[in-house]
Amino acid sequence: MLAALRCVIHRDLLLAARRSSDVLTVLLFFVIVVSLFPLGVGPDPALLRTIAPGVIWVAALLASMLALQRMFASDHADGTLEQMLLGATPLGMTVAAKVFAHWVISGLPLVLISPVLALQFDLPQELLGVLALSLALGTPVLSLIGAIGAALTLGLRGGGALLSLLVLPLYVPVLIIGAGAAEAAASSLGGQAQLLLLGGLLVFAAAFAPWAAAVALRISVE
Amino acid sequence: MEKTPGTPSLEAVDLHCVRGERRLFGALNFTLRGGELLRIGGANGSGKTSLLRIACGLLEPTRGEVRWGGEAIRRLQEEFWRQLLYIGHANAIKDDLTAAENLHVACTLAGVRTQPARIGEALRRLGLAGCENLPARVLSQGQRRRVALARLALSEAMPLWILDEPFAALDTAAVECVQNLIAEHVSKGAAVILTTHLEARITAAATLRIDLEAS
């Protein structure tokens, strides 16, 4: 079973490496959206410092939405998904492996580049770590919740718009807690509570979302 | 195959299938034992593919159930799928992977352990010598089908094969090769279900036929 999971992760990363434009689109989208804010809002350092965590979080959320549709679409189109459904490994585990690979491709780059982008907003250095950590805990949750939506809207016409409508409301708690972490760390409260909550959300989503997505996939493929 | 006497039987009990508004078939019963070949015939749109998808558990029948060794496949799930090789219309081939990588992924997903040497051998058997390391993007339609079917040469241990139009897009040499693989597998005591328009000459001890009529 572990061999199959390793194989799925390796395959998805290999495919992303051979078609790197998909990965770059998401990353560039994130960079550009975040960079537009200082240009639009004006160079008031106090204001920029206040909005920085929120802006970066919203941009990360939209960027991860952008990548969601691709999670199962190509496997569905070429029949690989059927083979996964009929595989020797429980489908929930296969989905978990796919979500992990998807996060490495579309979420991890955002986490890594976020401290650089935060510098544009004059965010104090001690907050950069908290922001990156909140994204590192939060973006996998976005991928996991998104997997359910992507599985439900698989093969539908206009699935993209429907996917956003389904998934964005579910992203709200992650956004509030995630952006709140850096804000709380900036005040004297410290962001520990928010980070722990995000960690809890991650564990919860990792335990349940792959199985929910697996059930949705079986329905979509019928 | 060492488990010849124990190959479980695949039973379809009172299957009904309605897709959308159309009733494709109803009250369909069959039992397929090890060493038997089942050919499903019928016009386009008569429900051949739906029947195969029901038999392998991708599609829920409107009524009735499919049993494997007396147990409903709906309950067996992975236990059944571990013993099943299904090759559908779609080849499940990724353009950006090479033929050998595609075959390796397909086998690993199905739980078949393979060494690179055996993968090369299987591809050569299907007449793909020299194409092992080419990306599937540059292969022709028939060659892609051959890559998908190369799994047959690596799945001797699977007691049930379900093949949807295996001969589509293949040339005569490849058709013969696939027919031999199927005949060999059946003679070892496994069960095979396939749909085809071709009058396939597969020598099997017992051949069952189901012809679905277009409704």
Image (cartoon, coloured by chain):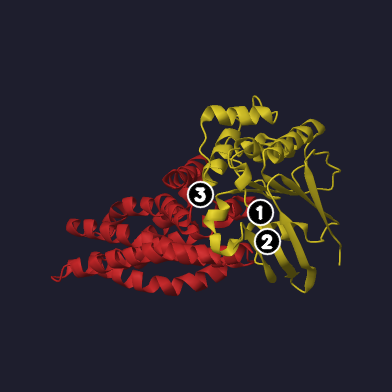
Chain colours: A red, B yellow
Q: From the viewer's perspective, is A153 left or right of A134?
A: right
Q: How many marks?
A: 3
Q: From the viewer's perspective, is B74 left or right of B38?
A: left
Which mark is first along the chain, 2 or 1? 1
The chain carrying label 3 is A
> Gap in Å between the C-alphas at discs 2 and 3?
36 Å
Mark 2 and mark 3 residues within 8 Å of each other at the beta carbon: no
Residue A184 appears in which quarter of the rendering?
A: bottom left
The chain carrying label 2 is B
For the N terminus of chain B, which image quadrant?
top right
- Specify the amino acid type for callout 1: Ser
Q: Residue at x 28, y 61 (%)?
A: A134
Residue B77 appears in which quarter of the rendering?
A: bottom right
- Specify the amino acid type for callout 3: Asp
The chain carrying label 1 is B
The answer to whether one can see residue B128 in this image is no
B77 to B144, vertically: above or below: below
Q: Which residue is mark 2?
A: B54
Q: Do marks 1 and 2 both belong to one polypeptide chain?
A: yes
Task: Judge depth for marks 1 and 2 and give the one in front.
Answer: 1
- Specify the amino acid type for callout 2: Ile
Local crowd at mark 3 within 10 Å, few (<14), some, or many (≥20)?
Answer: some
Mark 3 and mark 1 residues within 8 Å of each other at the beta carbon: no
Residue A8 image offset from top left, x and y in percent: 48, 47
